[in-house]
Structure formats: structure tokens, C-alpha cells
Image: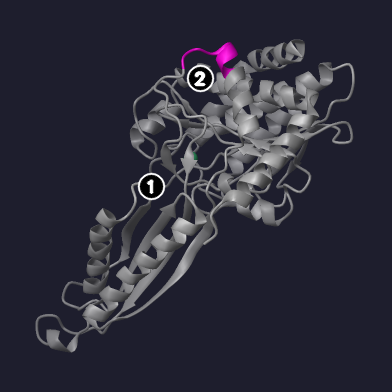
Amino acid sequence: MEDLKAVACAEIERMSGDLVILSNEIWKHPELGMEETKAHKYIAELLEKSGMQVERSFKLKTAFRAEYGSADAGPNIAVMCEYDALPEIGHACGHNLIAEVGVAAGLGIMAAIKASTKAIGKVTILGTPAEEGFGGKIDLINLGAFDDVDVAMMAHPFPSSDPTPVMLARETLVVTFHGRSSRAAAYPWEGVNALDAAVLCYQNMACLRQQIKPTWRTHAIFKKGGTKVNIIPEEAVLEVAVRAPTDAEYKQLRHKVVACFEAAAMATGCSMKYQTFEKPYSALVSNGILFRLYESNLASIHKDDGPSFRSGIYGSTDMGNVSRIVPSIHPHFYIGGVAVNHTRDFTTDAGAERAQPYTLAQANALAMTAVDLLLNPDLVQKAKAELQETLKREPSS
Ligand SMILES: [Zn+2]
């Protein structure tokens, strides 16, 4: 077994020059979700050159699937690539490094399958676009992309490492307040101010925050607040995120946040409507069988994890939805800097050379974990049983 792990790691080392070029190209050309045509092309070209069967535009325009091996002979292990960026601040979540980890791990696993004296299973690299809000993985789930997958793995850069991050269930709501316009300086009493409703709504949520659990999150931005200062705004719009660690808690928080909307509308005399914007993300389930293998493999090759935490709270991911369909891991890894995600400084860190050894160590650990699973398919069955047990134990709403 150790030989196949060594084969996988050697292949990742051999490809490291191409891998850093791939990561840098994606980093230099940041593309928003569902528009990642350059990243899609760069990755597909490298995988095709490496001998993988690649299906470009797999179910979605900027998704892809690359495969090697046979699922008749053993499990189908999927590694995920993300490659979308954020508006204005580029690769401030380091998804260029996620793409690199996925490609590197996939190539390592392919080399191990090739080197095995008998057929042991299959590796699939899935290119999953639009994590930042649009939920590309949710579309892919609904389109059947995970139907033949046994296990899904990826790794995400952060300023600290965490094998079992808490990624919250999340829904984004758009709330619109409607009032009545009027000439502000002449007939203010004729107006019904929708901006006032939005401001009160924001303040209601700010007051609510003291009364919610430390593991809950709610935050908002103003999308529309008027058009001209001498017109009392007739329409105002807020975008509001609601997050909690379980679906049951999420529903409690959502109820309280909607009460903030209603109170603001009532106080100002505005009408109010809200709707879900973007697809809801589920809370992440980190599979114990998988993350223990991952941790021991990582520890065997890599001693410098940087600042390390366990089960910290970091936001939400569409990998949460995947983790409820197939056993999954989504460990976070340190990349050598102190900047936090979604900042311009993190963009710099994600493109820095010092991120490379950490990134490749993750690829090695995921590839070694895949070798464990390919050679011990009973572990895959145990991971699936554990997932079913976990979902059964979750509190219902
Ligand atoms: Zn991210």
C-alpha cells in the first residue's frame, strides 16, 4: 500500500511545475461564477495532456469531469476543483489553489491506479464552478453528477488549518420595501420612506445579534436605497444572509430575521416582500472515517500546518450539500500568511509562491487517502454507513 502512496506523491512532485503554472494562470485571470471559461480551459488542457479522459462543459458550461480507471473494480473517488473568483477582489478565497489541489490529487491517484498490479477502482476529478453564491455543486447534484460517486474530497485554503471546519447552513434573502415617493423638501408627509424601512430593518437585525447563539450568523447589505436626494425613496432593497450549524437552528434564526423585516415595514407603513436569492447551502458533514485517514496521511508527510484549529466556524459552502449525498471532507489548510479570506491581502497570499508547499501537501494527503480507500473498499462502506447515521441523528426542525 505504501508503494502506491509513494507513486501518487512522486507523480504530484513530478507535475509540480505544471501545477503551479496552472494555479498562477487561474489566479491572474479571475473569473466570476459560471463564467470561468479560461480556468475551465486551462484545467481541461492539463488533464488531457496528462492522459485523462475529460468531458468539458460536463452538465454546466464551465464544469468538467475527468476520469481514469474502472468503477467495476472498486470505488469511484471524486476530488473537487473550484475556480471561481470574487467581484473586484479577485481570488480572495484562493479557489485557484483548490483547483490545483484537485488536479494534483487526481493526477496522483491516477498514477497509483496505473501502477497497481490489479484494477482497484476509479478516480474522478470534478470541476465544480460557481461556489461563491450560485451553488454550482447543487446544480451538479440535481443533474446527477454525483450519482456514480462513492466519496468526495477537496481542500480549501484559509489562514489556519482545520480538518473538520464548521460550515453553516445558509440562505440568502432579498427583502424589498415599497413606500411612496414625494418631493422631500415640499411634501414629505405625502411620502412613505422605503429607505427608512430598510435602515430600521438593518438596525433590528443589529439588535437581534446580541440575542442569538455565537454559532449563528446574519448579515446584510443595502442593494438599493433611493435614486435622488429630493425624492423620498419609494423602493429599498436589502440582501440578507442567514446561517446556522443545523437546519433546525437555521429555521429558528430565519424566523427571527423575518420578524425584523416585518417590524420595519409596519413601523414605516411600507409594504414588504422577500424571497430566496441563490440556492440554500446545507451545513457541512465532515466524514469521520475520511478525515481520520486524511489527518494521519497529512501528518506522515507534512509537519507545518501553521495555526491549527478544530471545528471553527468559517461560513458556508456548497460542498455542504455534497457532503449529505456522499461521504465527504472539506479540510481547511494554511497557506503561509495571516490574511483572512475575502480580502485583498488573501488574494496576494493565494498567489504567493510560499502557498505552494502547503497546497501540494494537501494534494498528497488527499491522494494518499484515496489510495487507502481504493485498497480497502470496506472503508468506503463504513464511511457511507457513518453518513447515514449522522443524518439520522440530526435534530429535525
Ligand atoms: Zn472559498
Residue 170, image x and y in percent? 47, 54
Quarter of the rendering containing residue 378: top right
**Which residue lies at the image location 61% right of the left edge and 36% below the top edge?**
287
Q: Is residue 345 magenta?
A: no
Q: Is residue 202 above or below residue 289?
A: below
Residue 222, image x and y in percent? 30, 62
Specify whether 191 is left or right of 148. Answer: left
Q: Is residue 300 magenta?
A: yes
Magenta segment, which residues? 298-304
Look at the numbered discs 1 and 2 and tell me whether their residues touch, using CB distance below 8 Å: no
**Which residue lies at the image location 51% right of the left edge and 19% below the top edge?**
358
Residue 153, image x and y in percent? 63, 34
Secondary structure beneath disc 1? loop
| Kind of residue sitting beneath label 1 | Thr
Residue sitting nearer the eye, 128 or 317: 317
Q: Is residue 310 above or below residue 15?
A: below
The N terminus is located in which quarter?
A: top right
Q: Which residue is mark 1?
A: 215
Q: Is residue 59 above or below residue 39?
A: below
Q: Which residue is mark 2?
A: 358
